[in-house]
Image: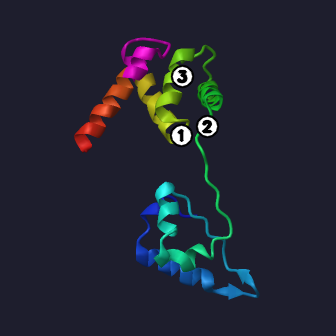
């Protein structure tokens, strides 16, 4: 399995193609799983990768979670910590979903930073203001990087 496969060099993709061409008794030597961002799909659609794309046996695109799935995911993660009381208000769950589009990695980032912000303010519950501060900070960081 290769994670962040969208960052693989052209040379490495060609090497993977050659390795996958080696078969024993009509069976592949090993399964190859490429995991990556949407850029990987766009990259593999290019003409120069046609030979590689033809060898891909299965493609799956993971969409973001729904609003309800996102809220349940967050609640589940909080339960895993052993906390009984809700750590996030319903409105913060909606804010997090809106900002993350249900993408788990982004949900995790926002939640973790919001929990830190709430703890710094001696709050047991993450409220809208905590999430809004996190989102504003992320926006400032994107602006500084761009």
Q: Residue furthest front?
A: 47
Check disc 1 and report its element: helix, strand or loop.
loop
Contact between labelled residues 2 and 1, with CB atoms less than 8 Å apart: yes
Foreground pick, 53 / 82 = 53
* Residue 18 seen by the camera: yes
Foreground pick, 87 / 66 = 66
- Place residue 120 in its image quadrant: top left
Q: Residue furthest left?
A: 144
Q: CA distance from mark 2 to mark 3?
A: 12 Å
Callout 3 environment at 10 Å: few (<14), some (14 to 19), or many (20+)?
some
Tell me: residue 56, above or below residue 129: below
Looking at the rendered image, the quarter that the N terminus falls into is bottom right
Disc 1 marks which residue?
103
Check disc 3 and report its element: helix, strand or loop.
helix
Q: CA distance from mark 1 to mark 3?
A: 14 Å
Q: Residue at x 54, y 40 (%)?
A: 103
Estimate the x, y position of residue 42 in percent, counting from the top left.
49, 62
Q: CA distance from mark 1 to mark 2?
A: 6 Å
Q: Residue at x 52, y 68 (%)?
A: 45
Estimate the x, y position of residue 12 in percent, counting from the top left.
45, 75
Estimate the x, y position of residue 78 in percent, counting from the top left.
59, 25
Contact between labelled residues 3 and 2, with CB atoms less than 8 Å apart: no
Disc 3 marks which residue?
94
Residue 104 in the magenta stretch? The answer is no
Residue 126 in the magenta stretch? The answer is yes
Q: Could you say which disc has been placed on residue 116 in the image?
A: none
Callout 2 environment at 10 Å: few (<14), some (14 to 19), or many (20+)?
some
Looking at the rendered image, the quarter that the C terminus falls into is top left
Disc 2 marks which residue?
65
Q: Residue furthest right?
A: 25
**Span of residues in magenta:** 117-132
């Amino acid at each position: 399995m290769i994670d962040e496969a969208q960052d693989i060099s052209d040379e490495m993709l060609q090497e993977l193609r050659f390795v996958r061409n080696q078969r024993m008794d009509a069976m592949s030597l090993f399964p190859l799983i490429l995991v990556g961002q949407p850029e990987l799909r766009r990259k593999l659609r290019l003409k120069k990768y046609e030979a590689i794309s033809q060898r891909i046996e299965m493609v799956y695109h993971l969409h973001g979670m729904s609003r309800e799935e996102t809220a349940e995911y967050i609640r589940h993660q909080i339960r895993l910590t052993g906390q009984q009381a809700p750590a996030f208000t319903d409105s913060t769950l909606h804010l997090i979903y809106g900002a993350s589009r249900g993408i788990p990695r982004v949900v995790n980032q926002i939640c973790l930073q919001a929990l830190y912000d709430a703890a710094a303010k001696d709050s047991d519950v993450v409220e809208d203001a905590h999430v809004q501060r996190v989102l504003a900070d992320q926006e400032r960081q994107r602006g500084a990087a761009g």
